[in-house]
Amino acid sequence: MKTMRTIFYATDFSQASERALDEAVGLAQQFGAQIWIVHVIEPVHYVTGEEFAAADLYTRLEEATERNAAASMEKLIGRLGNLGVKAETLLLKGTPAEQIVNAAKERNADLIVIGTHGRTGLSKLFMGSVAGKVVSTADCPVLTVRGR
């Protein structure tokens, strides 16, 4: 197996992501690799109106989302540090699959680890699959881990 130096762990802070983290940590420990904890904030589509209060609410919501994501990522950094795994965070905005794949390519990731929710049928059709899009567009191998 190829030596891994850089592992991208994509998280949405769900249980599926938690199981993927366990896999990423195990691989990082095995290979002495660094983990990039990556979270993508999808922009909220705001329909403009004449009310300033609506725009202000949107701005506050976006700022709170960023603060919460950054705090969650810092907790993960602490956890990984306690396990002896070198880790950094990357908070991005945009379409999750696209941002994950582009960032992994820019940082020469050897592997992307991402959780899957295991959706099927109509929910998969309407909600899509970030993991599926990452698998089909990434330049490096992708390990998908099904959550329970």
Image: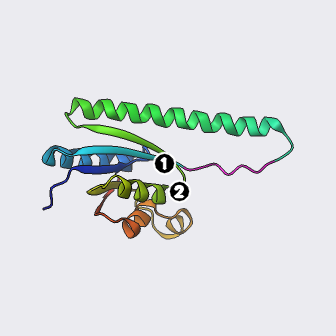
* Residue 54 drawn at (x, y percent): 77, 39
Neighbour tally class for label 1: few under 14, some 14-19, many 20 plus, Cα within 10 Å: many
**Quadrant in the picture for residue 133:** bottom left
What is the tally of numbered marks visible in this picture? Answer: 2
Instruction: Pick whichever, 61 or 101, lies toward us.
Output: 101
Q: Which mark is drawn over residue 49?
A: none
Using residue 97 as the reference point, say whether residue 62 is left or right of it.
Answer: right
Q: Are marks 1 and 2 in contact (CB under 8 Å)?
A: yes
Q: Residue at x 51, y 33 (%)?
A: 68
Using residue 94 as the reference point, say whether residue 78 is left or right of it.
Answer: left
* Residue 93 drawn at (x, y percent): 53, 48
* Residue 97 drawn at (x, y percent): 46, 59
Q: Which residues are magenta?
A: 42-48
In the rendered image, the quadrant that contains the N terminus is: bottom left
Q: What's the residue type where badge 1 is placed?
A: Val
Whether residue 117 appears in this view of the structure is no
Distance from Cα at disc 1 to Cα at disc 2: 7 Å
Q: Residue under circle 2?
A: 95
Q: Is residue 52 above or below residue 3?
A: above
Neighbour tally class for label 2: few under 14, some 14-19, many 20 plus, Cα within 10 Å: few
**Quadrant in the picture for residue 117:** bottom left
Q: Residue under circle 1?
A: 40
* Residue 87 drawn at (x, y percent): 29, 38
Q: What's the residue type where badge 2 is placed?
A: Thr
- Which residue, as the protein is rendered here, is positioned at the far right? 50
Please tell me which of labels 1 and 2 falls first in the chain.
1
Instruction: Pick whichever, 38 or 131, lies toward us.
Output: 38
Please, what secondary structure does the residue beneath circle 1 have? Answer: strand
**Quadrant in the picture for residue 105:** bottom left
Please, what secondary structure does the residue beneath circle 2 have? Answer: loop
Q: Is residue 114 above or below residue 39?
A: below
Taken as a whole, is the magenta stretch helix, strand or loop?
A: loop
